[in-house]
Image: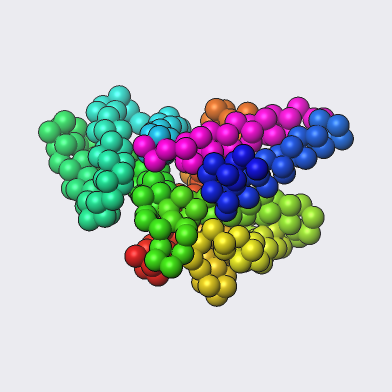
Amino acid sequence: MIIEGFFGEKVGIVFGLIFAMLIVATILIYQKFPTQELKERINSWWIIIILFFIGVVLDTTMAMFFFGLLSYLALKEYFTIIPSRQIDRRVMFYAYLAIIPQYYFASIGWYGMFIIWIPVYLFLLLPFKQVFIGETKGFLENTSRVQWGLMMFVFGLSHLAYMLTLPPILGADVGGKELVIYLVLLTELNDILQYIWGKSFGRRKIVPKVSPNKTVEGFLGAFATIMVLAILFSFLTPFTWSEALIAGMIISGGGFVGDVVISMIKRDIDIKDSGSMIPGHGGILDRVDSLTYTAPLFFHYVYYLYY
């Protein structure tokens, strides 16, 4: 198998499986369920998977640009949908600039600066910058919105980039690349499984005011299934079966929280989707919402256990 031989057996197996599933899903949708929405969704999945494959598997430097661009697009979409004034954009500009050092620290594996650049230095710097702008009205709201966006869409997502730089674990032939694939695969499957379980067996709404389609049955069904899949795909990790079980719980629970938190923002400003960049899916935030929580939670779980 070409993919397996070039990128390693374990990575090759996973991507071979993913592409096989995409082929089967594409045939089914175009032959059996040829609705425009489903066609747009599967076409977008092809683009997402190919970009992820190129960005993450081929080269670490390219991966940094890939995830940095993802953070930029997510932050830009967030700034677009939230209420803001022209004067607020001066501070937003510095938030965009903060992406560059954050991903630089990730690329060189400087854990100390990576972990405090946004939560400490930007937290202190951005309000001070607003002092020099001199506009007192709306100071608290703008500072909170900008810092929250940085924490979610730059700091949170950048854990994927830092994870890529993690060296192979002693006694195992897996490292950062395999861990990122494991995390993203289970996070996206969790979203899909919540939808499938909810549509099939959902009766009781879990957060009806925030996300009416989320059900207790959908959450529990996905939670249980992801725990099983976390063990099945644990060959991508150094985990024991019990560590993989806990990882599945973290990813499924964290993914659900990330999803409903972003839904809360959209309900607050009365929009259905965060954008229209990804046909059939909505905007960037609609696809990375779960990862904003699962990436840092899973990263620190792995870092605690093995690094």
Question: Which residue is drawn at the image coordinates 52% and 38% (left, top)?
Answer: 52
**In this rendering, position of residue 73 left or right of residue 273:** left
Quadrant housing the C terminus: bottom left
Residue 122 shows up from this direction: yes
Numbered marks: total:
0
Q: Is residue 219 left or right of residue 101?
A: right
- Residue at 19% x, 32% y is 135
The stretch in magenta equals 34-61
Q: Is residue 286 visible?
A: no
Determine if the magenta segment contains residue 260. Answer: no
Q: Is residue 91 left or right of residue 282?
A: left
Q: Could you tell me residue 173's position as x and y percent?
A: 47, 60
- The answer to whether residue 113 is above or below residue 29 is below
Residue in the image at 74% along x and 37% along y = 23
Residue 48: within the magenta? yes
Q: Residue furthest left?
A: 132
Which residue in the rendered view is the most extreme toward the bottom? 242
Q: Position of residue 299 (x, y in %)?
A: 41, 58
